[in-house]
C-alpha cells in the first residue's frame, strides 16, 4: 500500500494500484472540451478581460454521472436542477457562473436557472436535461440571466481542449478565490489505467458537508451511474466533507463526477483511489486558499470507538473559533482542543485523551505533560501543522483539514456586498 | 405589563409587578459581605495592586441556592464541587479565582480545588460543603493553590458591605473582560418588595448553554431550594443561554443563585422577573464586552411553530461567522441569515421567510424586496442592531443577543497563552 499524492485524508491506496499526480484538470480526459468567457455577471468582469465569469464544459455525449449538492435547506435553483438532471439520466455538460449565486431569489431564480440551462443546451446541441448548472457568488440578488444567455453561443464556440482552456474554466468559477484550483492523476491498476481530472472553486463558507464550493471531476473510467454514486460518495466523504474554513454551510455547493468510459472497465477501488486523490488535492487547495487562511492543520482524531464519533470530535475542534485563532497565533493552547471536543454530544473520557502537535506531546491522560514549549511553538508556526488527538477509546479515526482564523477573514467578509 | 429594564429577552413583567434598576450588585442584599484581594495567580496581579484575582462572598449562614454549570464534558474541578455542594444542601459562600481555570488538570486539579474550598471554609468559620468554588482563566496549567490558600485569611478579613467591596469582587473575577459587570433591581409586587443583585464575568468563549462566564446572583426573597432551581432555570434560559460571542462552550461556566430570605415570601413570578432582569443585564454586559465586539445584534426569530425551533434557527444565525462578520461590517447581507438558518436540522420553508433590519424590510417570501440600502446600512452601523426574522410558520419566538466578529477577536485569542 502506498499513500496517495498530497494525501491528508488518512486513506490508503489498494495493493497493486499506483496513483501518479499529473498537471492539469478535467481536460486530461479525452473528449473533454471546456473554457471560460466574460459574460458580465461579476462586476469586475467588465474591467478585466482575463477574469471570465461564465464557465462551460462538454464531453460531447451523455455519460453516467453522480452529483452531491448542499444539504442546506436554503438551496439555490441551480442545485435543484443539477440534482434533478443527474437523477434523470446521463448528462454531458456543465454551465457555471460566478458573481451571483442565484440563491434566495424565489420563483424568478428558478426561471433564470432554467433559461441558462436552455441556452447552454441550445448552444451545445444538447437536451436541457443533459446540462448541469452551477452558480456561485452573492446571495439574494436576482441573476442577470440575460447576460449569461447572451454569452453562451460565444462560450460554446470557444470550447477547446488543453490546459489553457482548463485554466480559463477554473478562473471563471472563482469568487474570493485567489488562485485557480485544478488537480489530475493517472491511476494504474491490475486491469489497466484511468485518468481523473478535476477543477474546483471555494474559499469562504467552507465547512464539512459541504463547503461553498463547486467541483467538476471527470474520469475516463467506464462506470455506470450507480458506480459513479458509490465512487463520489466515498471520495467526497473523505475529502470535501472533511474540510473546514469557517463552519458556514453554503446554499450552492455542488460536486459533479462524470465518467466518459473511454478507458474501459477498471477495478472500482482503483477508480475510487484516483477520484479521492483528486478530490483531496482540490479540497486541500480550497482550505489553503481559504479566506484569510495563513496556516492549515491536518487534524487526526484516532483511538475513537467508531468513525462517526471520531469525525464529530474532529469537527468540533475544526469549527471552534478559539482553536482556529490559537492555530493562527501559533499558540500550543491544547486546552482549546479538549474544550471544543467537550461540547460534542458524543461522550468521551477527558482523562484518557492525549494531544500531540507534530512530534511534541503536550497532553496525556487529559492533563498537561512537561514539554518543550519552543519546539511546540515551532511546530505550530509552520504553514502545515499536524495535530494528533488520541481518545484512548478504540481503533477508529477521522482526518480533517482546517484553516486558521485570521483578521484577514474578517476583512474579506465584513463588507462583501457593500 | 411593562418591559423589564434593559430587556432584550422579549420577556414580560407580570401585571402588578414593577422592576426598577438600581446601582450595584449582590451587596444591595442585606447580610452580603464580599470583596477581592490579590493572591498572585494572575501574573498581572503581581504588578497592579488594583487588579485583585481572588474574590470572596459570604452571606453569613447557609441559605437555599441553585447552580447551573457548564454542559461541556471537559469540566473543571470547581464545577464538580459547586454542583455537588449545592445539591447537598444550603450554602453560604463563594470563592472564585481568575487567572487559572484549573481545568484539564487531572486528579491534582481536584485536590487543588478541594484545598481552596477547605481554606475558604476555615477562614469563614463555615463547613467546606457550604462554600461554592469558581475558577476562570487559562486551561491546562496547574493551579498554584498554595497562593490562593495563603491569601484566604486576608480575603476573609477584608470582607465588607457596600459598593466598593462589590466592585472589588467584580474586578477579581475578570479575565479578558475590560469592565466589571454588576446589576441590581428592586422588584415590587402585590405581596411586597425583594432585592436582586448580581455580578458576572465573561467576554470570550461565550455561547448559548453556556458562555465562559461566572455569575453570582443574590436575592433576599424567601425561596426554598426547589424554587431557587425553578427561578434560575427560567432566568438563565432566557438570558445566559441566549447570548453568543464566539460559539465556544467553556469548561468552567457557573451561575449561582442564593436566596437569603430576609425579605420574606413574595410571589415567585415576581422574583423570577427580577432575577431575569438582573441576568439579562449581566448577559448584555458580557456580550457588549465580548472579545473584539464592536456591535451587538438583538436577534428576534418569530413566527416559529415552537420555541425550540425558534431558538435553533436563532442560534444558527448567532453562531455563523459569515453573519457575524457582516454584522461587523454593517453589511445588510440578509442572505447570510437565511443560509445560516438553512444549516439547522429544524425544517422550514425558505419561501415564507421575511427579514427586517430595524424598520427596513429587506427580504419577503425568501427573496429580496426593493429597499433603501442607505437606510439599511444606517441601521446596521449603529451600536445595537435589531434584526427581526419572521418564519411565517406559527406563533413561537426566541430572542438572542449576538456580538459581531472583528479582527480584534482574532488578535485577543491568537496568543492567549504565549
Image (spheres, coloured by chain):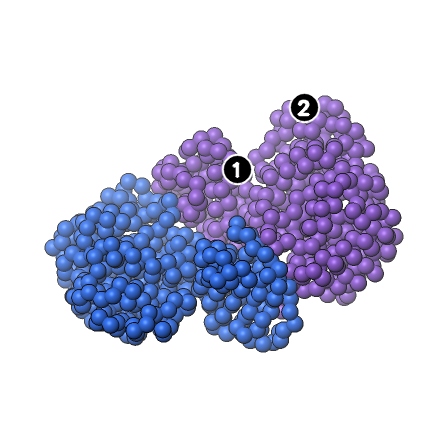
Chain colours: A purple, B blue
Residue B29: image location, x then y, percent: 21, 68
**Residue B56 visible (yes or no):** no
Labelled disc at residue A42:
none
Residue A193: image location, x then y, percent: 76, 29
Which sits in the foreground, A97 or A69?
A: A69
Seen in the image, is B209 located left or right of residue A18? left
Residue shown at 31% from the left, 67% from the top: B273
Neighbor class of circle 2 (other Cα within 10 Å; few <14, some 14-19, many 20+) is: few
Neighbor class of circle 1 (other Cα within 10 Å; few <14, some 14-19, many 20+) is: many
**Residue B376 visible (yes or no):** yes
Residue placed under numbered mark 1 in the picture: A398
Quadrant of residue A108 in the image? Answer: bottom right
Where disc 1 sits, the SS reads strand
Give the letter of the chain under mark 1.
A
Seen in the image, is A39 located left or right of residue A397? right
Give the letter of the chain under mark 2.
A
Residue shown at 33% from the left, 61% from the top: B235
Quadrant of residue B106 in the image? Answer: top left
Q: Nearer the viewer, mark 1 or mark 2?
A: 1
In the image, residue A418 sits, relative to residue B414, either above or below, namely below
Which sits in the foreground, B222 or A40?
A: B222
Q: Sequence order check: which comes first, mark 1 or mark 2?
A: 2
In the picture, which quadrant includes the N terminus of chain A?
top right
Amino acid at each position: 500500500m502506498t499513500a496517495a499524492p498530497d494525501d491528508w485524508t488518512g486513506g490508503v491506496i489498494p495493493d497493486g494500484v499506483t496513483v501518479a499526480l499529473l498537471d492539469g484538470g478535467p481536460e486530461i480526459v479525452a473528449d473533454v472540451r471546456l473554457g471560460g468567457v466574460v459574460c458580465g455577471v461579476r462586476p469586475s468582469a467588465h474591467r478585466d478581460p482575463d477574469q471570465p465569469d461564465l464557465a462551460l464544459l462538454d464531453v460531447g455525449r451523455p455519460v453516467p454521472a453522480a452529483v452531491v449538492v448542499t444539504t442546506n435547506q436554503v438551496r439555490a435553483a441551480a442545485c435543484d436542477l443539477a440534482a434533478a438532471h443527474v437523477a434523470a439520466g446521463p448528462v454531458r455538460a456543465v454551465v457555471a457562473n460566478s458573481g451571483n449565486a442565484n440563491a434566495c431569489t424565489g420563483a424568478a431564480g428558478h426561471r433564470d436557472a432554467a433559461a441558462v440551462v436552455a441556452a447552454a443546451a441550445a448552444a451545445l446541441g444538447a437536451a436541457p436535461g443533459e446540462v448541469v448548472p452551477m452558480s456561485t457568488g452573492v446571495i439574494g440578488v436576482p441573476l442577470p440571466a440575460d447576460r449569461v444567455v447572451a454569452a453562451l453561443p460565444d462560450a460554446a464556440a470557444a470550447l477547446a481542449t488543453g490546459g489553457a482552456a482548463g485554466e480559463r474554466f477554473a478562473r471563471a468559477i472563482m469568487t474570493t478565490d485567489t488562485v485557480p484550483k485544478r488537480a489530475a492523476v493517472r491511476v494504474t491498476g491490475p486491469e489497466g489505467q484511468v485518468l481523473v481530472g478535476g477543477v474546483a472553486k471555494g474559499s469562504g463558507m467552507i465547512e464539512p458537508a459541504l463547503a461553498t464550493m463547486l467541483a467538476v471531476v471527470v474520469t475516463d473510467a467506464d462506470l455506470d451511474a450507480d458506480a459513479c454514486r458509490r465512487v463520489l460518495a466515498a471520495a467526497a466523504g473523505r475529502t470535501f466533507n472533511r474540510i473546514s474554513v469557517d463552519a458556514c454551510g453554503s446554499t450552492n455547493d455542488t460536486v459533479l463526477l462524470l465518467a466518459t468510459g473511454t478507458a474501459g472497465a477498471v477495478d472500482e477501488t482503483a477508480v475510487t483511489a484516483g477520484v479521492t486523490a483528486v478530490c483531496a488535492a482540490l479540497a486541500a487547495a480550497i482550505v489553503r486558499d481559504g479566506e484569510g487562511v495563513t496556516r492549515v492543520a491536518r487534524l487526526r482524531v484516532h483511538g475513537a470507538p467508531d468513525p462517526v464519533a471520531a469525525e464529530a470530535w474532529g469537527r468540533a475542534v475544526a469549527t471552534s473559533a478559539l482553536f482556529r485563532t490559537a492555530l493562527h497565533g501559533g499558540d500550543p493552547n491544547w486546552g482549546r482542543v479538549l474544550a471544543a471536543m467537550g461540547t460534542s454530544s458524543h461522550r468521551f473520557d477527558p482523562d484518557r485523551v492525549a494531544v500531540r502537535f507534530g512530534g511534541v506531546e503536550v497532553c496525556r491522560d487529559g492533563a498537561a505533560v512537561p514539554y518543550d514549549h519552543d519546539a511546540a511553538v515551532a511546530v505550530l508556526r509552520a504553514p502545515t501543522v499536524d495535530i494528533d488527538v488520541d481518545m484512548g477509546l478504540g481503533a477508529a479515526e477521522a482526518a480533517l483539514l482546517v484553516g486558521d482564523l485570521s483578521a484577514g477573514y474578517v476583512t474579506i467578509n465584513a463588507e462583501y456586498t457593500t
